[in-house]
């Protein structure tokens, strides 16, 4: 399935569910249900931003933006992570208030709506299961939806416990557990997006293995000024200077090297400079 369609279906389903869950949470006085609805709303915004960034990244480059708009996916991922933690703060405030002033909870309604949430979030996660590998934007959407499905399962269990025990204070307590799960599961995504904005080497790439591969190429005696950075949440670039004494500029060598880097490390944009020896300037300044 094309991911544009997946985004559209996911946003539509979750938006309808957020409205239903919010109304049900207010009517049943369930902070767990409201906390789940608040998080689902942040996921709707997350899906919309990720979708918009994907569309923007597909636009061609221009004289002003020579790399195109691929980095929009990184910015969207960072904004989504920030929105998620802002939503957690709001939900935490509401949950504390419900814990101080517990109200009767309609456990049956909570269980029904949260059960629907398992289906909605599970289906949305299923739509992104194939695209999550190698793209932090799609992986964020997938993990959010999968986490929400599990959280909705927790709400169902909580609603059943309230019905069985009559302990209404269990509802905000379960909300605290939900918040902890969401915060924990999202921390890795936040850390990775911050690293991408700082042009760090993507976590999927081992720089030492890249260096070793370059040194193993025919005629290469030294590698310096090796840089690897993300152009987007899917595309990675590399620049490097290779010292190949007496080999000159070999087009076949460069084409094969680029193909190898693409196959082994998914590095799609390579700029390689061939040198007879290390420039004196590099030796004197201690550049890598």
Image (spheres, helix red, strand yellow):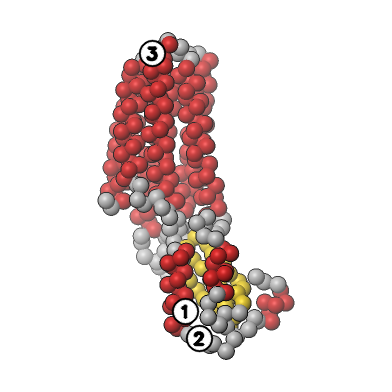
Indicate the position of residue 148 as horizontal and vertical percent values: 40, 34
Which one is in front, 158 or 73? 158
Determine if residue 67 is in view: no
The tag earlier along the polypeptide, 3 or 2, is: 3
- SS at mark 2 in the image: loop
Q: Which residue is mark 3?
A: 163
Contact, mark 1 vs mark 3 (Cβ under 8 Å) = no
Contact, mark 3 vs mark 2 (Cβ under 8 Å) = no
The tag earlier along the polypeptide, 1 or 2, is: 2
Q: Residues within 10 Å of mark 1 (few under 14, many from 20)?
A: some
Residue found 38% across the figure and 13% down from its top:
163
Q: Is residue 173 above or below residue 123?
A: above
**Which quadrant is the C terminus positioned in?**
bottom right
Residue found 53% across the figure and 88% down from its top:
248
**Could you tell me how far apart the alpha carbons at marks 1 and 3 are, in whole angstroms?**
68 Å
**Could you tell me how far apart the alpha carbons at marks 3 and 2 are, in whole angstroms?**
76 Å
Indicate the position of residue 213 as horizontal and vertical percent values: 53, 70
Q: Is residue 141 left or right of residue 207?
A: left
Q: Which residue is mark 2?
A: 249
The tag earlier along the polypeptide, 1 or 3, is: 3
Which one is in front, 206 or 91? 206
Contact, mark 1 vs mark 2 (Cβ under 8 Å) = yes
Indicate the position of residue 253 as horizontal and vertical percent values: 47, 81
Q: Which residue is mark 1?
A: 254
Q: Is residue 176 above or below residue 199?
A: above
- SS at mark 1 in the image: helix
Residue 10, quarter of picture: top left
Which one is in front, 276 or 35? 276
Indicate the position of residue 146 as horizontal and vertical percent values: 39, 38
Residue 259, quarter of picture: bottom left
Q: Residues within 10 Å of mark 2 (few under 14, many from 20)?
A: few
Residue found 43% across the figure and 78% down from its top:
255
């Amino acid at each position: 399935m094309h991911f544009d369609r997946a985004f559209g279906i996911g946003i539509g389903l979750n938006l309808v569910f957020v409205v239903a869950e919010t109304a049900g949470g207010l009517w049943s006085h369930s902070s767990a249900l409201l906390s789940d609805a608040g998080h689902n709303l942040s996921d709707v915004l997350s899906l919309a931003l990720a979708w918009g960034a994907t569309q923007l990244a597909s636009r061609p480059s221009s004289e002003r933006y020579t790399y195109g708009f691929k980095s929009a996916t990184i910015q969207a991922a960072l904004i989504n992570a920030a929105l998620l933690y802002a939503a957690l703060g709001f939900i935490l405030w509401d949950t504390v208030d419900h814990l101080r002033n517990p109200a009767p909870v309609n456990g049956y309604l909570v269980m029904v709506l949260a059960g629907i949430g398992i289906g909605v979030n599970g289906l949305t996660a299923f739509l992104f299961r194939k695209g999550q590998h190698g793209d932090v934007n799609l992986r964020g959407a997938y993990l959010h939806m999968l986490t929400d499905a599990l959280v909705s399962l927790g709400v169902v269990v909580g609603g059943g416990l309230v019905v069985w025990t009559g302990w209404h204070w269990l509802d905000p307590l379960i909300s605290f557990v939900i918040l902890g799960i969401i915060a924990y599961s999202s921390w890795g995504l936040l850390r990775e997006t911050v690293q991408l904005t700082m042009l760090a080497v993507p976590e999927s790439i081992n720089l030492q293995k890249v260096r070793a591969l370059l040194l193993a190429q025919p005629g290469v005696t030294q590698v310096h000024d090796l840089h690897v950075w993300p152009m987007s949440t899917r595309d990675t670039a590399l620049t490097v200077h290779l010292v190949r004494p007496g080999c000159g500029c070999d087009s076949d060598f460069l084409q094969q090297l680029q193909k190898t880097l693409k196959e082994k490390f998914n590095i799609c944009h390579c700029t390689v400079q061939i040198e007879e020896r290390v420039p004196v300037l590099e030796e004197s300044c201690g550049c890598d």
